[in-house]
Image: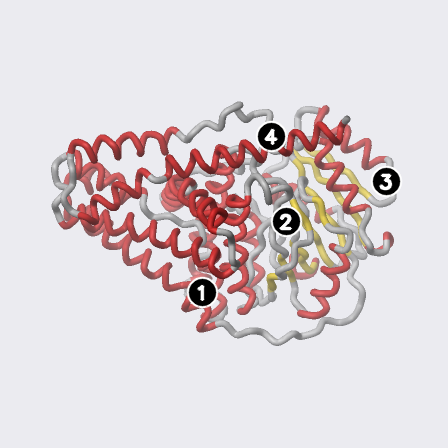
C-alpha cells in the first residue's frame, strides 16, 4: 500500500490529507472536552469502612525491590484486619527471583498471600484475574500496586476518604517516580503531563481510565465489568472503558500516594511508550463502537474524555514521513502531495510543543526542565509513530515488562536504529534534494530532531540509573 501511495501521488495525497484531518480532530479534543465537562458534584458513598485486597502482579522482578514494596504495604496506617496483600508471581522461571519473595511472604503469612503460577495466559491481566479469584470474601475494593512502587503510610486511608467523599466506583492516583528531582526531572515532567491534562480533564466527566498502578476499584464493579482482559497490552485502560460503559464512575485523585522507578534506559522508556501507545490504540479499535457512540450509552462528554485518554500518545506521522522521503528521493518535493505530507509532520511537532510547553507554563516548570520534557516527548515520537501504525494495521503485539534491574542495559544508552536511520536520511536529503518548499524543509528538519532529543534523554536516564544503583548498593552495605 505504501509503495502504491508513493508511486501514485494522488493516493499518497489522499492519505496525507486524511491524516491531517484526524490530527486536527485530535487537537480539538482537549478544548472540546473542557467545554463539555460536567464538574460532578460529590455523591457521598455509604460510610461503611472499605475492606481492601491489595494485588501485586510480578514477573521476573528484583526480589529486593518487591520486598520494599511489600514492607510499605505492611506499614499502612490502616487496621491490619481491614486489608490483605496478594502477590501473584506469573511465569517467572528463575527461582532466585521469586523464592526470596515467597520466603518473605511466609514470615507474614497472616497478612500476605503469595501465589506462583506458570503457564499464565494474558500477561498482567491473567495474573490479576488469578489474584481476584483468591481474594478474601470480605473484600469491598481491589487495589493494584506495581512491584516497584513504595506507597505512603496513609495510602489506604486516603483511598478510603476519597471513595467516601466522591462516591466513585473506582479512583486512580497519579503515577510518580522516586529520585527524579536532580537527575531526570524532564523525563518525570513528560510522564506527568498525561495526568495533569488528560486524566484531570477526564475527572470532570467521571470517565477516568485506569493506568495500572495505584488504582482502587470496587470489587462489585470489577466483577460486573467482566474482570481483567488480556485483549490489549494496556489491560488497565481497556478495563476502564468497560467500567465506564457499564455505568460505573471513575475519578482521578491528584494526590501523590506512592512512587516507583523510571525506566532505567532510553531503550526501556521507548518500549514502555510503545506498549502504552499501541495498547491504547488496540483498546480504541476494540471498543470503537462504544467510544464513537455506535453502541453503549455513554454521554458525549464521557466519550470525548475516553477518546482523549486513549489517543494521548498517538502519532500519525509514520506514513507521511515515509512518503515524503520517497518523494524527495524521486524529485517530487515541490508537489502538493509532498506539501501535505510536510503539513502532517509539522502539525504533529506543533502538537507536541504546545502540550509540553502548556504544561510547563501551567505548572511553572523551570525553563530547563520544560526543555528536557519537550526533548523527551520528541525523542519518543518515532516509537509512538511506529506503535500507532502497528496497532492500526493489526500487528501482533506483545506485553513487555519494563526492566527494573538495569542488568540488560548497556553501559552507554544505545540509540534506536530507527531514530539514527531517520536522522542520516534527513541529512542526506537536505544535502541532495535541498527542498525549496519551506513546509517540506521544516518537516524534514522535524524528522531529524528525535536524535539529539534522544541523546539528551538517554543521558538523563543513564544518570538516573547510576543514582538508583548507588542507592541500592548503599542500602545493601
Q: Secondary structure at mark 2?
A: loop
The C terminus sits in image quarter: top right
* Marks 3, 2: nearer the viewer: 2
Where is residue 118 drawn, in percent x and y? 66, 31
Mark-to-mark CA distance, 4 and 3: 35 Å
Q: Are marks 1 and 2 in contact (CB under 8 Å)?
A: no
Q: Earlier in the sequence, mark 4 or mark 1?
A: 1
- Nearest the eye: 66 or 354: 354
Q: Which residue is mark 1?
A: 304
Q: Which residue is mark 2?
A: 213
Q: Which residue is mark 4?
A: 466
Q: Disc 4 vs disc 2: which is toward the camera?
A: 4
Cβ–Cβ under 8 Å for marks 3 and 2: no
- Between circles 4 and 1, the one closer to the viewer is 4
Circles 4, 3 touching at the beta carbon (< 8 Å): no
Badge 4: few (under 14), some or many (20 or more) residues near its Cα, within 10 Å?
A: some
Q: Which numbered disc, 4 or 2, marks the residue that appears first in the sequence? A: 2
How packed is label 2: few (under 14 Cα within 10 Å), some, or many (20 or more)? many
Secondary structure type for disc 3: loop
Circles 4 and 1: CB distance less than 8 Å?
no
Who's the residue at 68% across and 40% down the image? 147
Counting from the top left corner in percent of width and height, residue 60 is at 65, 31
- Tell me if residue 297 comes above or below residue 223 in the rendering: below
Q: Which residue is mark 3?
A: 109
Estimate how packed mark 1 is, as few (under 14), some (14 to 19) or many (20 or more) residues with alpha carbons within 10 Å. many
Residue 1's quadrant in the figure? Answer: top left
Q: Position of residue 158 (x, y in %)?
A: 73, 60
Mark 3 or mark 2: whose residue is earlier in sequence: 3
Q: Secondary structure at mark 4?
A: helix
Which of marks 3 and 4 precedes in the sequence? 3
Give the residue drawn at x 60%, y 63%.
250
Amino acid at each position: 500500500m505504501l509503495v502504491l501511495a508513493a508511486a501514485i501521488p494522488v493516493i499518497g495525497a489522499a492519505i496525507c490529507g486524511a491524516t491531517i484531518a484526524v490530527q486536527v480532530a485530535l487537537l480539538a479534543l482537549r478544548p472540546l472536552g473542557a467545554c463539555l465537562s460536567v464538574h460532578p458534584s460529590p455523591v457521598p458513598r455509604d460510610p461503611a469502612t472499605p475492606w481492601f485486597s491489595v494485588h501485586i502482579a510480578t514477573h521476573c522482578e528484583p526480589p529486593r525491590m518487591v520486598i520494599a514494596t511489600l514492607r510499605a504495604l505492611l506499614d499502612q496506617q490502616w487496621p491490619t484486619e481491614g486489608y490483605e496483600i496478594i502477590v501473584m508471581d506469573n511465569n517467572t522461571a528463575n527461582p532466585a527471583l521469586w523464592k526470596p519473595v515467597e520466603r518473605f511472604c511466609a514470615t507474614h503469612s497472616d497478612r500476605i498471600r503469595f501465589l506462583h503460577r506458570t503457564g499464565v495466559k494474558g500477561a498482567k491481566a491473567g495474573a490479576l484475574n488469578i489474584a481476584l479469584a483468591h481474594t478474601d470474601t470480605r473484600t469491598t475494593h481491589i487495589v493494584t500496586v506495581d512491584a516497584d512502587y513504595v506507597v505512603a503510610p496513609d495510602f489506604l486511608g486516603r483511598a478510603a476518604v476519597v471513595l467516601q467523599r466522591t462516591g466513585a466506583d473506582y479512583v486512580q492516583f497519579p503515577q510518580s517516580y522516586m529520585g527524579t528531582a536532580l537527575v531526570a526531572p524532564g523525563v518525570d515532567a513528560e510522564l506527568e503531563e498525561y495526568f495533569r491534562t488528560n486524566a484531570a480533564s477526564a475527572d470532570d466527566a467521571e470517565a477516568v481510565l485506569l493506568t495500572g498502578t495505584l488504582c482502587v476499584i470496587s470489587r462489585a464493579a470489577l466483577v460486573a465489568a467482566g474482570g481483567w482482559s488480556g485483549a490489549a497490552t494496556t489491560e488497565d485502560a481497556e478495563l476502564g472503558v468497560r467500567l465506564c460503559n457499564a455505568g460505573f464512575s471513575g475519578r482521578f485523585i491528584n494526590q501523590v500516594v506512592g512512587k516507583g522507578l523510571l525506566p532505567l534506559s532510553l531503550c526501556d522508556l521507548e518500549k514502555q511508550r510503545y506498549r502504552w501507545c499501541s495498547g491504547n490504540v488496540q483498546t480504541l479499535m476494540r471498543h470503537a463502537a462504544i467510544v464513537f457512540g455506535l453502541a453503549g450509552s455513554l454521554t458525549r462528554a464521557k466519550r470525548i474524555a475516553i477518546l482523549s485518554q486513549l489517543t494521548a500518545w498517538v502519532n500519525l506521522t509514520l506514513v507521511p514521513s515515509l512518503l515524503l522521503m520517497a518523494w524527495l528521493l524521486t524529485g517530487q518535493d515541490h508537489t502538493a502531495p509532498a506539501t501535505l505530507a510536510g503539513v502532517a509532520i509539522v502539525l504533529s511537532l506543533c502538537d507536541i510543543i504546545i502540550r509540553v510547553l502548556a504544561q510547563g507554563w501551567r505548572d511553572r516548570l523551570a525553563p530547563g526542565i520544560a526543555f528536557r520534557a519537550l526533548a523527551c516527548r520528541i525523542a519518543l515520537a518515532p516509537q509512538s509513530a511506529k506503535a500507532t501504525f502497528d496497532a492500526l494495521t493489526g500487528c501482533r503485539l506483545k506485553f513487555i515488562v519494563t526492566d527494573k534491574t538495569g542488568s540488560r542495559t548497556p553501559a552507554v544508552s544505545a540509540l534506536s536504529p530507527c531514530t539514527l536511520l531517520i536522522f542520516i536520511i534527513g541529512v542526506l536529503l537536505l544535502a541532495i534534494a535541498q527542498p525549496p518548499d519551506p513546509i517540506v524543509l521544516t518537516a524534514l528538519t522535524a524528522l531529524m530532531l528525535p536524535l539529539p532529543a534522544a541523546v539528551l534523554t538517554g543521558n538523563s536516564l543513564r544518570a538516573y540509573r547510576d543514582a538508583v544503583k548507588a542507592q541500592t548498593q548503599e542500602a545493601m552495605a
